[in-house]
Image (cartoon, helix red, strand yellow):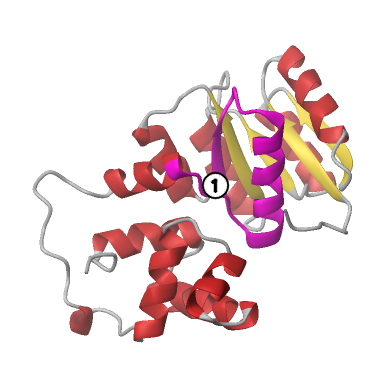
Amino acid sequence: MATITTPVQIALLDDHPLFRQGMRYILQALPYVESVVEAGEFGELLALCRQRLPDVLLLDLQMPGMDGPEVAQALLGEFPDLKIIVLSMFSADKFITQMMKLGARGYLPKDVDQPQLAQALEDVLTNGHHFTERVSKAMLRGVQQPARPAPLSLSEEVHFTPRELDVLRLICEGRTTADIAEALFLSSRTVDGHRQRLLEKTGSPNVASLGVYAVRHGLLEG
């Protein structure tokens, strides 16, 4: 695991007080967590974010009055740098792909264990995202239609270097910057540079959207 030296604030949005209390206890035990704030509804969370934007938000999908996708859209519209990790009992592909397309940085089941939660937080804080095998497969299936059209020609879209495509494929496998650097014999800074150019070329706001673009345009084939 990467070492996080800067104290962080975690926010929780869940309408079950007992669940929030248990999560608070777990999160406060992490050495880099400075504080944990919690809310039971959107308005309460919005006020907290406007007072101090948390580093990471753990978001439940099923909320009274305003569900998870609506909350994510509203928050990211006002706070585009907010890092959201979904914690949900719903594991169907449609929920995962919807939230990742909206800009969530990770998606975890509510029965996740403490080491998995800690890993997800560290990945999001250091790399900007956390892709599990479940999430990666759901996203790939989510953009593949039964009558899938032929991939668009790269010449009609965006030109990528062979190295950019190598990096793109590894990103879509959920590899970390360090993993990609080791696999391709590159420095971490060079990998970060390739990632940034890929985001710019595809007009993708985040790595999750980059994965969707790659599948839709047939860039993971071959």
SS for dot 1: loop
Quadrant the C terminus occupies: bottom left
Residue 204, above or below 92:
below
x and y percentages locating residue 124 in the rendered image: 65, 52
Residue 3, above or below 102:
below
Report the span colored magenta.
106-133
Residue 18, above or below 141:
above
In the drawing, does residue 159 fall left or right of residue 95? left
Task: Identify the image quadrant of residue 181.
Answer: bottom right
Q: Which residue is mark 1?
A: 104
Camera-side residue of 55 and 71:
55
x and y percentages locating residue 54 in the rendered image: 78, 47
x and y percentages locating residue 38 in the rendered image: 79, 29
Residue 123, above or below 64:
below
Camera-side residue of 216 and 29:
29
Is residue 105 a member of the stretch shown in magenta? Answer: no
